[in-house]
Amino acid sequence: AVLVVLVVLGSPPAAGAEPSEMFQEMVKAECRFIYSTEQVRFVKRFIHNREQFMLFDSGVGHYVGDSLDGEKVARYWTSNPEGMEYRRAAVDRHCWHNYELSRPFLMGRRGER
């Protein structure tokens, strides 16, 4: 974990050491509440070496590739009906669940500065 942080922050390798082939994989998930709660979308982004290559957007309903490799992976993952059912249910499982847990805290702060 420390090595990954050092590579990401740009720390040079130790003197005389050969740099290894490192890459960064990241997945970011977010819930988007549009017009308060009129529309809720679950978006999961897949990032490789600081470039997004694929995402899942519950508003679209399937994976979308942002690169040639991302398109291949998106087609493969979208072809799995059980996986797609699980991913589409993420709006209820993640977004609404977390919204209900945090609503009392968030609503009490509305308008405060």
Image (cartoon, grey):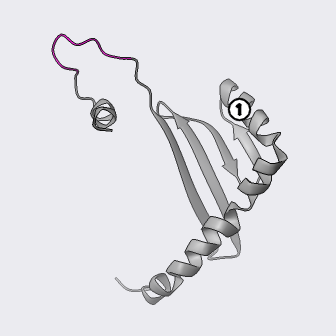
- Residue ID at (53%, 49%): 28
Q: Nearer the viewer, residue 47 or 5?
A: 5
Over which residues does the magenta segment extend?
13-20
Can you say whether 21 is above or below 38 in the image? above
- Residue ID at (45%, 32%): 24
Can you say whether 75 is above or below 99 in the image? above
Query: Is 44 colored magenta in this rendering?
Result: no
Q: Nearer the viewer, residue 40 or 79?
A: 79
Task: Give the quarter of the image for residue 13.
Answer: top left
Outermost residue to the left:
15
Left or right of 80, for residue 35? left
Can you say whether 109 is above or below 52 in the image? below
Can you say whether 56 is above or below 37 in the image? above
- The number of discs equals 1
Left or right of 61, for residue 2? left
Left or right of 1, for residue 53? right
Q: Nearer the viewer, residue 71 or 97?
A: 97
Q: Amino acid at mark 1?
A: Val
Image x and y of residue 67, in percent: 66, 28
The residue indicated by pointer 1 is 73
Task: Give the position of the C terminus as an image quadrant.
Answer: bottom left
- Residue ID at (59%, 63%): 31
Image x and y of residue 75, in percent: 78, 34
Secondary structure under badge 1? helix
Query: Is 19 colored magenta in this rendering?
Result: yes
**Which secondary structure type mostly characterizes the magenta part of the structure?**
loop
Task: Give the quarter of the image for residue 52.
Answer: top right
Disc 1 packing (10 Å; few <14; some 14–19; many ≥20): some
Whether residue 59 can be seen here: no
Image x and y of residue 35, in percent: 64, 74
